[in-house]
Image (cartoon, grey):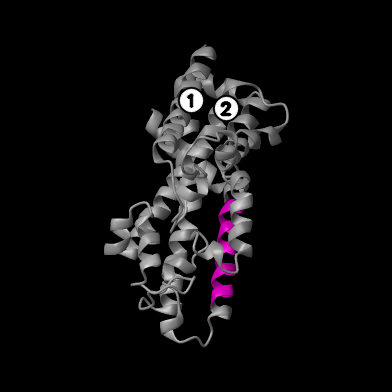
Amino acid sequence: MLVRTMRSQIVFLLRKKEAVFTFWALMLLVLFNFLENCQMFQGSDILELAHTTKMGLLSLNRASYSADLALLFQQIYPLLAVCPAGFVLAKERGTQEHVLMITRMGSGTYYFSKLLSAFVVTAVVFAVPFLVEIPLHIIAFTTKPTWDLSHWGAYDTAYIAEVRNYLFSGLYIRSPYGYAVVKVLLFGLFSGLMGAFSVAVSALYKVKFRITVLLPVFLLLNLSVYAPMILRNMEGSVAWHIFVMLHEDMDKNVPIFLTGLVLIVVASVGGTFWAARRDQL
């Protein structure tokens, strides 16, 4: 019952205007970034080009070089992450539609199908545009360039030190494109978790103003950015973009970040379970 309901919810959410809008907004950002790269590097010698994965919008290396689009994406992401599926439960609870659906399928199936379908739909919407971006750059710039956008060569000692700070640095060294695909998929899963978290929060109380659904994820992600300022003795960073974006060479506090992710999962599942028990008929 849960699987069948979740499948129908996924199809329903993928057709909703919020998911369609978010998908095309991301695709436009990706295409604008691609066209900007084409314009910037037109006529450049192949030896002067950066590795094609580092030209992508999701690369932190791109965010350090003509970074308008990359920084814009980082600024709007905490809001966009909620848009594909985060509002679905708030809408149905606002119109009392959820009462009819709980009567038909049970509160547990209803709430958990919403949580899981929000996770899947958000993950798909955020992963696909950046997966499309990888072959776009390969076609336009080939796979031969090995440079960094900071113009460090592949054998420069500073560049090697940077690479060793990447998450999954071993995979990047063996297969840069395999690394890019894995990181994009992880970015999609992280986005899915943010979408599911927003649904879980809206299950706990009746949302009076739907715009408030945006706040939990927005505050959570911005808190991760400013955590070193709040916790002055903390070593490394837990900023969301340093973990989920590509080519992140900054010092990271992995244990705290992973602990935060586990707490978000527990809060999402626990909040959904509590809401299902509360609304049992």
Label 1: which residue? 267
Residue shown at 49% from the left, 19% from the top = 107
Q: In the depicted view, which residue is nearer to us: 226 or 66?
A: 226
Q: In the depicted view, which residue is nearer to us: 279 or 164?
A: 164
Can you say whether 14 is above or below 259 in the image? Answer: below
Q: Look at the magenta stretch and give its main secondary structure.
A: helix
In this view, the residue farthest toward the left is: 174
Residue 141 quadrant: bottom left
Q: Amino acid at mark 1?
A: Ala
Label 2 crowd bin: few (<14), some (14–19), many (20+), radius 10 Å: many
Residue 246: where, in percent of width, then height?
A: 44, 57
Answer left or right for 16 relative to 246. right
Residue 146 quadrant: bottom left
Q: Amino acid at mark 2?
A: Val
Residue 209 lies within the magenta run: no
Answer left or right for 44 relative to 171. right
Of circles 2 and 1, the one toward us is 1
Residue 132: where, in percent of width, then height?
A: 45, 64
Residue shown at 57% from the left, 79% from the top = 40
Residue 257: numbered disc: none
> Can residue 18 be seen in this snapshot?
yes
Secondary structure category for the residue under label 2: helix
Label 1 crowd bin: few (<14), some (14–19), many (20+), radius 10 Å: some
Report the magenta residues as a range.
20-37
Label 2: which residue? 201
